[in-house]
Amino acid sequence: MAVANEHQKIAVIAGAGPAGLTAALELLRRSDIKPVVIEMDGQVGGISRTVNYRGNRMDIGGHRFFSKSDWVMRWWQDILPVAEEQDTAGNPLKITYQRQSRDLLPSRRSPSSADAVMLIRQRLSRIFYRRRFFDYPLKLNASTVRNMGLLETLRIGLSYGHAQFSHRLPEISLEDFFVNRFGDRLYRTFFKDYTEKVWGVRCQEISAEWGAQRIKGLSVAKALAHAVARPFRSGEETSQKATETSLIERFLYPKFGPGQMWETVAQQVADQGGDIHLRHRVVGVERQGQDIKAIDVLDLATGSTRRIPCDFFVSTMPVSELTPMLKPEDGDVIRIANHLPYRDFMTVGLLLKNMHGAPNSGSSSANNGMPPDNWIYIQEPDVKIGRLQIFNNWSPALVADPKTIWLGLEYFCKAGDELWSLSDDRFIDFAAGELEKIGMIQRSAVMDGTVVRVPKAYPAYFGEYSEFGAVRDYLEGFSNLYPIGRNGMHRYNNQDHSMLAANAAVSAMLTGGQGKSDIWQINAEEDYHEEIEAVA
Ligand SMILES: Cc1cc2nc3c(=O)[nH]c(=O)nc-3n(C[C@H](O)[C@H](O)[C@H](O)COP(=O)(O)OP(=O)(O)OC[C@H]3O[C@@H](n4cnc5c(N)ncnc54)[C@H](O)[C@@H]3O)c2cc1C
């Protein structure tokens, strides 16, 4: 492990997710510092990995590849170019994500094979509620009124109108925040259950400030406000249509799921002289004052531990794990780090022969009843499932047999809770039962299943998080420590934010630490995040 020549500097990197691998490749491209990546899992990619189950591939969460950053878009395309056949008639390719449209820079090289490519995918996702499909973003159109019933639609409208004149003050909780903006009825219909499912905390217990910070740019909220208010405005039908067409979301997606990107990057890291140690875990940090001197690494296969001296330490592991390893003198720093909140996540992969079309599943449902969506928000209060991924619609290459339907049933939970602790077999059975209950499948159509558990999938922003600044300042005090990435910074990062932080960390390493503290500014503007925010 970690053989470098005597004078070569070493950067130990904890974690082979997007942040760690970007840092490793950038170090190799821009310096002679040797990256030594330590990854506790058996594969690379972190949360953005692709899990291969008997030839069927699962994307944990459904990863759209889109970034406002040209650097990131370029970087991805240099690793996996866009499939040539997607580039129609030489026109610039357009992608659109969360109401932001951009031309795609042409790939700088041709794909090395028909498989080593990214596809351009068009998004469809709907809300499933009252055993029916609602458009997403929600529109106040004939289909919504039909689904809701005229009376309920009127009630929602009245409740929304009431909220415009009578505010809950002071606005303390997330519930107050929602009710003030959307009315009690709409809050109870579309926000309450789902938010509580996602975060496992009642909306009354989440601060309104959190809502304001996290929800302000949210598309459902905007869409709902827009949808509810639309009938009271006039003369915007034509421009509305034009806007809607331009907002059809298109994003990049590696043919074999997000993990393909990170497996390719890992290969390049290895080819260019970096080390990647899978099934190894960072378990300790040796420091002298404010300098990190060495990292203790446990080999999960043999149980043996060894110490790797280092010049830099890049940590993408959770702040709550890293901080105690540094043995802070300040008890408050330990307390806050130990209590940082997280939400955990489970996905059940379910292979089926066919599905039931729900009553209004749409004419584009396939012969085997598979809905056309990439994913579906399940708003039904009588089941625990939060979202349903239809992997066939992300990329047909994710599915071994195109005649089958390959689903991901997503559950938000807490590691160790009742759901998390069920055996895989029982969980698969439970999850299939939930889909049957809401009328989407018959259990007899299930051919196979598997379970993936993702601890700390969501760094959460309540509880001790309000004191996070003390931990950040403490970590910032180390001369050669670079905490980056989603859990590394306890930030609601998408892949691109993690990559930008990694790139900035490498720049700082190469300039004697210049710009080190600016890394915390990346993704601080909070205006675009993964989809969970749009509904929670
Ligand atoms: C449901 C869901 C949907 C998402 N959708 C999107 C999307 O559409 N688009 C998008 O861009 N992003 C999306 N994301 C976010 C994306 O998954 C993350 O931003 C990205 O994976 C973060 O990369 P990272 O390297 O910072 O962290 P991670 O992916 O968490 O990687 C960290 C790595 O560190 C390893 N590790 C942890 N502790 C140790 C240790 N002690 N020793 C060794 N290794 C350790 C872990 O095993 C892991 O491999 C989504 C996330 C979720 C949960």
Image (cartoon, helix red, strand yellow):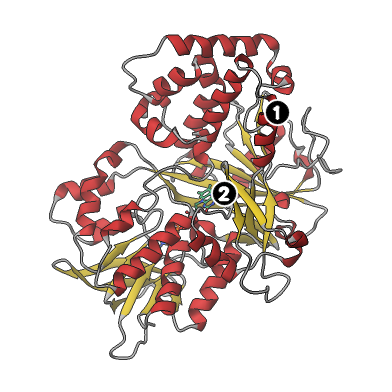
Tag 1 residue: 238
Tag 2 residue: 61
- Where residue 280 sits in the image (x, y, percent)? 41, 70
Whether tag 2 and tag 1 are in contact, CB under 8 A, the answer is: no
What secondary structure is marked by label 2? loop
The image quadrant that residue 136 belongs to is top right
Rounded to the nearest angstrom, the CA distance separating label 2 from label 1 is 35 Å
Quadrant of the drawing holding the N terminus:
bottom left
- Where residue 91 sits in the image (x, y, percent)? 72, 58
Instruction: From the image, state whether disc 2 or disc 1 is nearer to you.
Output: 1
In the image, residue 48 above or below residue 243: below
Question: Is the C-beta of the residue carrying label 1 under 8 Å from the nearest atom of ligand 1?
Answer: no
Residue at point 69%, 38% (across, down): 245
90 to the left or right of 236: right
Tell which circle, 2 or 1, labels the residue nearer the N-terminal end. 2
- Where residue 475 sits in the image (x, y, percent)? 23, 58
354 to the left or right of 200: right
Q: Is residue 240 visible?
A: yes
Category of crowding for the residue at label 2, using alpha-carbon neighbours closer than 10 angstroms: few (below 14), some (14–19), many (at least 20): many
Label drawn at residue 134: none
In the image, residue 211 above or below residue 71: above
What secondary structure is marked by label 1? helix
